[in-house]
Image (cartoon, coloured by chain):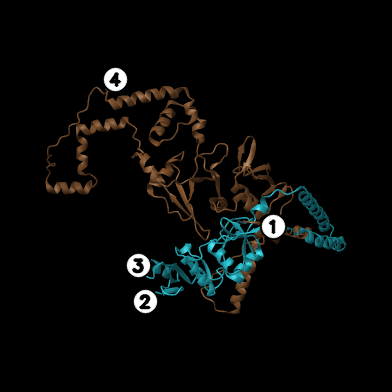
Chain colours: A cyan, B brown
Amino acid sequence: MYLTLLNGTGYIFDVDDCMDLRTKHRIMGALVGTANSRGWSTSEAALPLALTNYETQLLIDEGIAVLVSKVVDLSKQPDSAKLMAYKEEFDRRLLAQADALKAEKLRETKRHVDKILNGKRNKLLQQGKTAEAAQLYTDRIYDTDSLKYRVFHDLWKRGKYVTAGDAFGADFLVYPGDPLLYHASHIVIVQSTPAIRPLELIAKVRLSVIVNKRCVFAHATTAGNQIAYQTVAWSNPSK
Amino acid sequence: MDGANLIGITSKRQFLSATDLIVERHAEVETPAIGLKRTSIEGTPAEEEELKNAYANLRRQLSARRIERQAGRAVAHWHEDQQAAEVLRKDGKFESFGYSKQGKLYLEYYEALFLLELNRLQLEYCEMIVSVEQAYVLLLGEAASEKFNNYLVYSTLSRAGYIVVKHQANTTTSTSTAAVVTSEHCIWALLDEALGHKPVPAHIKASSLYKATKERWSEVKQQIMSHQTTTLEDDNSLDFKFETRKRKAQSQPQEQSKRICRDKPTKSLVNHLKAEPSFKKFQEIFEKLDIIQLQLTDDDSEMNKELRHFKISFDLHLHNEGFRRSAPKSPTFSVVILPTDEPFPTHDELLQCWRQQLSHAVPLLVISVSESKQIQAFLYYIS
C-alpha cells in the first residue's frame, strides 16, 4: 500500500486502501475531503484520509505501507507525445459515451450494442492503467522513541482500535471494536513519570466517569523498556 | 533523495466505462442513519451484521463519484509558476469565489480545491484534467503547512452556510465609501489614526475638507497641551471646590424615614449630592461632550515585542445580509486559525489582533484544528 506524502504525513486517496487500513490494520485516520453531496453534516466526510504522523510511522514500521512523494511526478510538464495520447484517449472516452447514451435511448437494440461496449470497455481498461513514478520517502515522520509513539504502538499491538484522544483532552482513545460501531472504552493519558498529581488524577478520572469510560494512565517502566498502564475506575461504597 | 529511491507504482486510477458512467451519473449518496453505538463486543450475529452494514455504508459513501457533463463544470487552469488557478469558464454562482487581477479571475487554493471536490470545477494542468490527488499535491503542496488546516476550516465553514472570504485587511467598508465625505468623517478618521493607529483611508485624505480639519485638529491639540485660553472658554468659570465639610444627615423622625425607605427604596445617599451646584455644572459640561471610550490605554510599542502575532485568515459573512464581493460590508466574524500546538492567545494578544481589523465591532472567532482533524471554534467578544 502506498501513502501519498502531504502535510508531512501520509494521505490515502483510494477507497480500498482506506477500508483495508480500517478493517485489517485498525488504523482510522481522519477523512478530510469535502463530500460532493447535498446538505452538510460531520458524517458526510470524503476521501482523502489524513493519517496522524504516528499512524503513518506505525504503518511504515510494521511494513504495512510505504510513504511516497509524488510531487515531482504530479507537477512535471507532460511531453507532447503523452499529451497527444491523453487527448486521444479523452476523445475516445467521450465517443464511447456517445455510443452508450444512444444505447440507453435505443433500449430495443441494446443486446447488439452490449457486445460492442464490452469490447470497448476491456480495451479501455487495458489502456487506462498508467504507471506513475513516485519517490520513496524515507525520512522519519514521527519520533519513534517518543513515549507517545511507544504507547500508541503498544496499544495497537495489543489488538486495540486506537485513535487520537483530543476530543476528550487526552492522548488516545481506545475502542473495543471499530469506532464506526463502538464507543471508546478507555481514555489514555500518557505520563512522563509514574507519579500522578492529585488534582490531575481527579480531573481526568472525573471526566472519564462522566463519559462512561475508564481512565488509563500510561508511562514507561523505569527498568525495562516497557509501557506500564494504570487503570482507574470509580467505585461508590454507598451503593 | 536520489534516483535509487524511485519506485514505479501501477496507478489504481481507472476511468469508468461509458455504461457505468451513465448509470452512476445521477446517483445520490445518502448518509445512512447511524444507530446507537455499542459499548462492548458481545459477538452476536446481529452485531456482526451491524458492523458489516456499517462498513458497506462507509465504502459506498467513500466511493461516491464526481460525474458531470463535459460542459457542466467551471474550468480553471493551474499556473504552477504563479501558484494560482485562473478561471477560464465560469459556471453556476461564483459570487463569493475568486479575486480579480489584471482583468482575470483567479481562485485561491482553498476555493479551487473546494469547488473541485464539490464537482463544480474542472482544474486543468498542462491541458490535462487533474485528479483529486494531483490537486492536493499541486494546490496544498507536499510540505507540512497551514494550508491544510485552512482548507479544512474553509470547507467546514462554507458547508455550514457562511460565506467565507479572505480577510480584507486594507479596504474600507462600503458604508464609508458610498457616503460623501463630511468633516465629521475627517475627524473620526483622525481620531482613529491617533488612538487606534489605523491609517487614514485614501478617500478621506483626498477630500478637500481633510486638510482644513487636520489643521484645526492640531490647533486644538496645541491649545489643550499648552492650556491656552481661547474664545471658547465659558464666561462663568467653574468653581471646582468641593464642600469637604461633614454634612448633616437630613434630620427626620425615625418612623417617617422608615416609611420613606419603604416607599422609595431606590433613593440612595448619593442622590443627595445631585442638588449641589457643582454637580449641575459638571452635568452641563458632560452634556456638551461626546464621551468616547479610549481604546488604547497603553503605549504598546514595547509590549508588542513579546506578543505572538495572530493572523486573521478569513472573514465570515452571512448569506441573508446581501454579501457582494465588490463592496463587502464589515464581516460577521473574523477567523483566526491557531497554528498546530500553539496555545490560545492571551488577552493582550487578542486585543492586538482585534485592533488590526477595520471595524472594531467584529468579534474574533478563534479556531483550533486538533490532531484528529476536529474543528473547535471559540468566539471572542471584546468590549
Identity, as a three-letter code, of the amino acid under mark 2: Asn
Front residue of this view, candidates A28 and A234: A28
Identify residue for label 1.
A133
Identity, as a three-letter code, of the amino acid under mark 4: Thr
Look at the numbered disc 1 and give the secondary structure of its residue: strand
Identify residue for label 4.
B231
Q: Chain of mark 2?
A: A
Image x and y of residue B72, in percent: 71, 48
Front residue of this view, candidates A8 and B75: A8
Identify residue for label 2.
A236
Q: Chain of mark 1?
A: A
Q: Is residue B166 left or right of residue B194?
A: right
Identify residue for label 3.
A197
Identity, as a three-letter code, of the amino acid under mark 1: Ala
Cα–Cα span, label 3 and label 2: 22 Å
Badge 3 vs badge 2, beta-carbon distance below 8 Å: no
Circle nearer the viewer, 1 or 3: 1
Mark 1 vs mark 2: which is more N-terminal? 1
Q: Is residue A171 left or right of residue B77?
A: left
